[in-house]
Amino acid sequence: MTATAPTQDRPYKAAPLAWDNALIRRYDLSGPRYTSYPTAVEFSTDYTGRDMARDVVASRASGRDLSLYTHLPFCAHLCYYCACNKVITRKRDKAMPYVERLLREAAIQAELYGGHRPVRQLHWGGGTPTFLPDDAMRTLMAGYGELFNLAQEDSRDFSVEIDPREVDDQTLATLKALGFNRVSLGVQDLNPVVQKAVNRLQPRAMTEAVLAEARRLGFGSINLDLIYGLPHQTPASFADTLGHVLEMAPDRLSIFSYAHLPQRFYPQTRIQGDTLPSPADKLVMLHETIERLLAAGYQYIGMDHFAQPDDSLAIAQREGRLHRNFQGYTTHSDCDLVSLGVSAIGQTDGAYFQNHHDLPTWEARIDAGELATLRGVRLSRDDRIRRWVIGQLICQFRVDRADFTGLFGEDFDRYFAGERRRLRPMIQDGLVHDSGEGLSVLPAGRLLIRAICQLFDAYRQDGASQRFSRII
């Protein structure tokens, strides 16, 4: 299939990826995932809770819808690969005090944001959200309902991350009754040897049972997470896992690359380096996975995400409505993000801000009736311009010059003269096409989209940074 350059009046048309080993070797450096711009490494502790309150109040006049993110850090079991902010405990009685503090924090933020604004998107992440007993879940959602204007229409996106090991016979029914309509199941790998090596024993039948129950209850856009590059994985073993997953036919799939950084994430010290697949084997796993997913009819969304053609993400991408925030790819674009819980990140149109990572510190700030802001950044005009360009590239795989000028009153070629010079090798290598009307990412460039976006990142002009994972 020959790739064509999308234009303003021609919606994105899904095209297959092109795998080129030479180009991957050339451009597979490290780089941000661009869930924000500027990225979180640019957040400063000079940005305080007072700054956050000022920016949130200023955003209230926009009348934008809200997205509500809650970080629930508790896990009953330690997965050795995990780099998330978490608290390992089996004491379920820790849940309710945390929920009570979440609601106190939510009350402060509802007053700042304006609780009347519709909440179109809501997400519980972790940690393990299903660590919470059912009564704690009900208390939390009831409290949110009193403080915020939670959307009721079917188009809302209320999602929750689920560990199938932490699901009893009432968990999914409780979540459905609370208004959740989308779930994401952590799987990672179905091979028992790999599961034992990462301390996550989760039989295939358990995952299948949770998936079947979620479908029976009417959850949509069900996602499964897989990780390639884990200990004892081989191309053959991961292909076997993928075969079983394709039989389950989830609506969405996230295929993450494991980054082994034991010097930064202590749990990973329990994984022996000599049990990890080689970089060459990881590339084989990814290549074969992509080929099989495309052959099975999945649409490549971007980065490491795939969706069935009739899923809302795939439709949004084809219609040019796909966006990206700290929750990943989303169909809900112009939302201010309310961040609740330890380490949670929020945003307005003009700022990003993050809560304290340390649970006792977060608790103390909430108990004092204060915002728990640790750091943040206020966007300059240049930040906003570059955020839009990077967002267009990473979500729509194109940037239209007329749209750019219409939004910002700038000439694209003059504003990005230096970036266009640095882009020439990628154009010559067939990663990007310049039609004159705009830039479009070609099939060979789609896997390397992070490298392309990095050219427009004013904070990454020197190239790759060891503070980020490798692009592939």
Image (cartoon, rainbow, N blue to C red):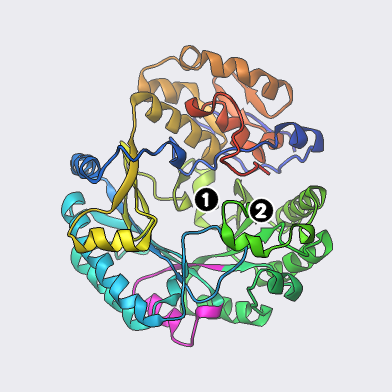
User: What is the quadrant of the C terminus in the image?
Assistant: top right
Say which element carries label 2.
loop
Tell me the quarter of the picture where residue 430 sits: top right
User: What is the quadrant of the N terminus in the image?
Assistant: top right
- Tell me where residue 277 appears, x and y as whole percent: 79, 56
Graded by Cα atoms within 10 Å as few (under 14), some (14 to 19) or many (20 or more), the crowding at tag 2 reads many
- Tell me where residue 429 appears, x and y as whole percent: 74, 25
| Residue located at (59% from left, 37% from top) | 31
- Tell me where residue 465 appears, x and y as whole percent: 59, 34
Task: Answer left or right for 63 relative to 425.
Answer: left
Task: Answer left or right for 275 relative to 309.
Answer: right
Vertical arrangement, residue 179 with respect to residue 448, above or below: below
Residue 258 at least partly seen: yes
Graded by Cα atoms within 10 Å as few (under 14), some (14 to 19) or many (20 or more), the crowding at tag 1 reads some
For this rendering, which residue is in front, 3 or 324? 324
Tell me the quarter of the picture where residue 56 sits: top left
| Residue located at (50% from left, 31% from top) | 9
Segment colored magenta? 165-185
What's under tag 1, amino acid-wise? Answer: Ile
Residue 148 at least partly seen: no
For this rendering, which residue is in front, 229 or 203? 229
For this rendering, which residue is in front, 9 or 345? 345
Residue 196's tag is none
| Residue located at (75% from left, 31% from top) | 26
For this rendering, which residue is in front, 409 or 55? 55
Residue 315's tag is 1
Residue at the spot of label 2: 260
Q: CA distance from mark 1 to mark 2?
A: 34 Å
Q: Are marks 1 and 2 in contact (CB under 8 Å)?
A: no
| Residue 179 on the magenta span | yes
Vertical arrangement, residue 439 with respect to residue 164, above or below: above
